[in-house]
Amino acid sequence: MSVRATVVIPTTGERGPLLELSLPTVLAQSVAELEVFIVGDGVGPGARDTIQRFVREDSRVRFFDFEKGRRRGERRRHHVLAEARGEIVCYLCDRDLMLADHVAVLERALADADFAYTLPIFIPHMSDELVFQHTDDYSDPADRATRSCSLPLSFVGHTLARYRRLPHGWRAAPPGVATDAHMWRQFLAEPSCRVAFCPRPTILYFHRDPHPGLPVPERAQELTIWAERMRAPGWQAAFVERARDLAIADRARLARSPLRAALKRWIGARSPGTLSWLREHRSLSALGTWARGQLAPYSPRGALAAARLARTTMESHVLRPHVEDFESAELVPGVRLEVCWVGERVGPGPRCAVFAFGDELMRLDCFEGEGAHMHLAMQQTNAATRGDIARLWFPPGSVADNIARGAFELEHNLAYAIAVNKDPRVRALRVPAERLAHAAAWMRERMEQMVAARGLSVSTRPRP
């Protein structure tokens, strides 16, 4: 049998009840010519019995039974891909479910690309709600050079040929860096890598929740509900249509990638004088007017979507300062923390920011130079700000003092910024205290490392 796709499913411990539900969704794909590699990273005897039963029942399934490796056993995935025969490689987390056309959608996309991903959506625990992850367009090498790729494992596919040309392949990620993001950056770091975004939901993704995640019986109960729905005639097609409608209403996400490209062309077609004026005055009116017309066919909320998208595009492609050492960490689905070194006009310095559904909730800046300052900016926290940024200015102190203060504000006041936000989706979010404490410590460490790496001292005072 010719193999069109290799599907890799990493697993560990006693997660047999999850594989009982997730693995059949792979074997039921519309593309039947596939091989399924189950990569065991220290599986228990119960899970091993479950996997071996699938191996006996379906010749397409292979089991690689490794002892527990470093971190999540990422290097094991590299070893098994040496035996892959599929033209493309897809993945599935053992707690996710795959709609029947997932492999087919990625296969079509990868006919003209090296790396592809489908529409990322999250299903909160024991909920029918669909949450859309902020999705950047990674097709432009200039864009992805300054963006962190946080795509979860199950949404991504790539060609086997391109994987075998990577410098490392799967390997253990550094502390504080997500395993999947560390892998995808190898693809996106190559300017010649062709990337495709498939604006179609093909995966039911269930977030792990705070470490160590839900107990297996509780997660299996949740997957059982969704697996039964998936087997009902016509349910998957109806789900795709529902998700598409919600995606269009949610700031026209299906139009985001082509519209961003069009906005960039619009900006590039302006005269150099106009581009300089846009940078200087940060005017969004012309972009907003143009974008409304482009979004009108997609959503009755096109005006609001256009204004937000125009702002995002302006900030990303016209106003974005020089960014270095960019890193990103997901706090919970829909909320991520970004840390980087920026070269603002007021002076260079470290920055961290928290985003929810693509909007900034909180930002900590520490700049040197003539316009030196240190402040915490809280975006959209209450009606009094009218959408502007409310700044909490820190008293003069050393860089280390102010970074430590910023970590304190992140750990103790992000909940306030979420609770009083104007967006009801943001107000519904909950970030566990232990997760915030870990994120604050990571942010503090990274910002101090950025300062030290540039030969500066954290004991200096950022304000004259």
Image: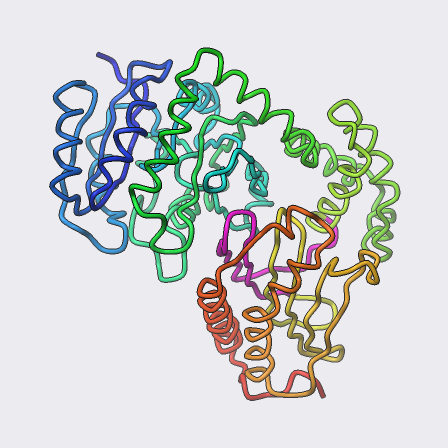
Residue 234 in the image: state x and y as whole percent.
49, 12
Does residue 42 lie above or below 100 as drawn? Answer: below
Q: How many marks?
A: 0
Q: Is residue 336 magenta?
A: yes
347 shown above or below 171: below
In the picture, measured across the screen, residue 337 lies left or right of residue 228, that is: right
As for residue 4 lying within the magenta part, the answer is no
Which of 176 and 419 lies nearest the eye of the viewer?
419
Please name the predominant secondary structure of the magenta segment in the image: strand
* Position of residue 323 in the picture relative to residue 333 (left or right): right
Give me the residue at 35% from left, 15% from top.
31
Q: In which quarter of the image is the C terminus?
A: bottom right
The answer to which of 343 and 307 lies nearer the viewer is 307
Residue range in magenta is 318-342
459, 193: nearer the viewer: 459
Colour scheme shown? rainbow
Q: In which quarter of the image is the N terminus?
A: top left
The residue under the point 77% across, 63% down is: 389
Looking at the image, residue 22 lies above or below residue 440: above
Q: Is residue 419 left or right of residue 291?
A: left
Measured as percent of width and height from the top left, residue 355 is found at 61, 54
Q: Residue at (68%, 47%) from the top-left corner?
A: 424
Q: Quadrant of residue 290?
A: top right
At 55% from the left edge and 35% from the top edge, which residue is drawn? 130
